[in-house]
Amino acid sequence: MTKTDRLIKDFGKQIAQGEFEPGSALPSEADLCVRFQTSRNVMREVIKVLSTKRLIDAQRHRGLFVMPNDQWNYLDADVLEWALEKGANKELISSLIEVRSLIEPTISRWAAERATAIDLVAIESSYNEMAASRSDPPAFQEADIRFHNAILLATHNVVIQQLSDAISALQRAILEDTFRTEDEDITRTIRVHQELFEAIRCRNAKAAEEASLHMVLDTERRAVAELGKDGGSVLR
């Protein structure tokens, strides 16, 4: 990690984790250079990157401000990681699940209609990795992410494919706070992923859509149990 990358992470985490209030003014560029012991050129690059993540609003002649948190780019993997690192954010997790329920069933339906033999091999391979990693939660979760990404790529929709990193970030963030390691839960997770793969393999679009929705609802159930949410809340 370069010094610039490290500062992006450190400063980004401070903002996302509430060290600076949303909407508040940030220290001047010169003060930030002192705070992070870096040059103006490096600090300007850090500010530029955090502005693209919509954490910072750099206003000409006025200074730097923290963006309101409802404008942060939660489709950015870094922003999601930083915002959730200190603990589950119930409203954010709820919003992520709502997005999954909106897009993943459609993605699964398209995959069932369009998947090639190569796509099916990639989906099955990721599923097999999940089944083989049931006693290794980190490996299991990464295989789960690859499984869904392989389904997304099987849509052969260039716009959806460009969202693959963002959607994977959504799934990873949700898994971090809803994943259960009990054997019963692992077995159920493997089973619903197998049902989805079989529906896609058999080109049963309706079954694929239903299996995907069932999977998201199961995630919501776990979120309610783990986080104590009442469900249906939206990010504000």
Image (cartoon, rainbow, N blue to C red):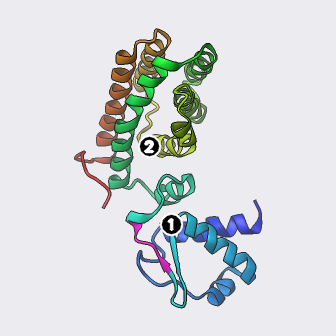
- Residue at far front of view: 158
Q: Which mark is residue 74?
A: none
Q: Is residue 11 magenta?
A: no
| Residue at x 46%, y 40% (from the top left corner) | 175
Image: 105 above or below 120: below
Q: Quadrant of residue 71 in the image?
A: bottom left
Task: Where is residue 198? Give x, y as percent.
Answer: 46, 12
Marks 1/2: CA–CA distance: 21 Å
- Report x, y in % for residue 41: 74, 79
Q: Within 10 angstroms of label 2, few (less than 14), some, or many (20 or more) residues? A: many
- Residue type at numbered disc 1: Arg
Mark 2 belongs to which amino acid? Answer: Ile
In percent of width and height, residue 206 lies at 34, 17
User: What residue is disc 1 on?
Assistant: 54
Q: Is 204 rendered above or below residue 221? A: above
Query: Does the stretch in magenta take in 67?
Result: yes
Is residue 109 visible in the rendered image? The answer is yes
Residue at the spot 53% in from the left edge and 54% down from the top edge:
76
Q: Position of residue 96 (x, y in %)?
A: 39, 46
Q: Quadrant of residue 145?
A: top right
User: What segment carries the magenta color?
Assistant: 65-69
- Give the residue at x 33% y 43%: 98
For the image, the number of numbered tags is: 2
**Residue highlighted by disc 2:** 174
Q: From the image, which quarter does the N terminus lie in?
A: bottom right
Q: Residue drawn 69% across and 72% down? A: 45
Q: Is residue 43 above or below residue 102?
A: below
